[in-house]
Image (tube, grey):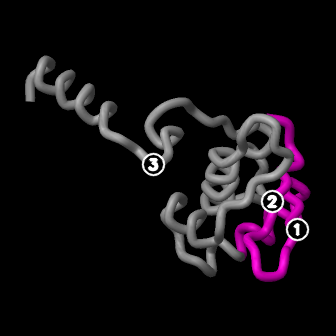
Amino acid sequence: MNKEENKNYLNKFLQRPFKNKYKVTGFTVIPNQVFFDDRLGRSELMIFWVLTLHLFRGKKYVFPSVRTIQKEARISRPTVIKGLKNLELCGYLSIEKIAGKTSHYYLKVSI
């Protein structure tokens, strides 16, 4: 694929209707404090990253389902659950469980 074909493909790809535009535009950041914490593994970093993707202006919490986190982080459900607990133990996350609804995750790190 030459440069012109690649450019056309990229433009066509970006013009597709996406349900969630954040998946193709913008960016997210993992704070250095979290990134360089030796207590966290790759799974926890991916989970934290996914949670920051769902943090929208004006919200103090995020509420993706475990299934959404699993899908976007590309890790198994037990790994997501274990990772969320570890992030909470390390003080980067507070989890509010709501019966019959998706949990609310409060990020305790400035982004």
Is 44 in front, or is 28? 28
The residue singled out by tag 1 in the image is 96
The residue singled out by tag 2 in the image is 105
Earlier-in-chain disc, 1 versus 2: 1
Q: Which mark is residue 19?
A: 3
Q: Is residue 74 above or below residue 56?
A: below
Find the magenta span and give its range: 82-111
Earlier-in-chain disc, 2 versus 3: 3
Neighbour class for label 2 at 10 Å: few (<14), some, many (≥20)?
Answer: many
Q: CA distance from mark 1 to mark 2?
A: 6 Å
Is 102 in front, or is 52? 102
Where residue 59 sits, quadrant-wise, is top right
Residue 96 at x, y percent in the picture: 88, 68
Is 70 in front, or is 38? 70
Q: Inspect the image, locate mark 3, and give the three-letter code of the amino acid beneath it.
A: Lys
Neighbour class for label 1 at 10 Å: few (<14), some, many (≥20)?
Answer: few
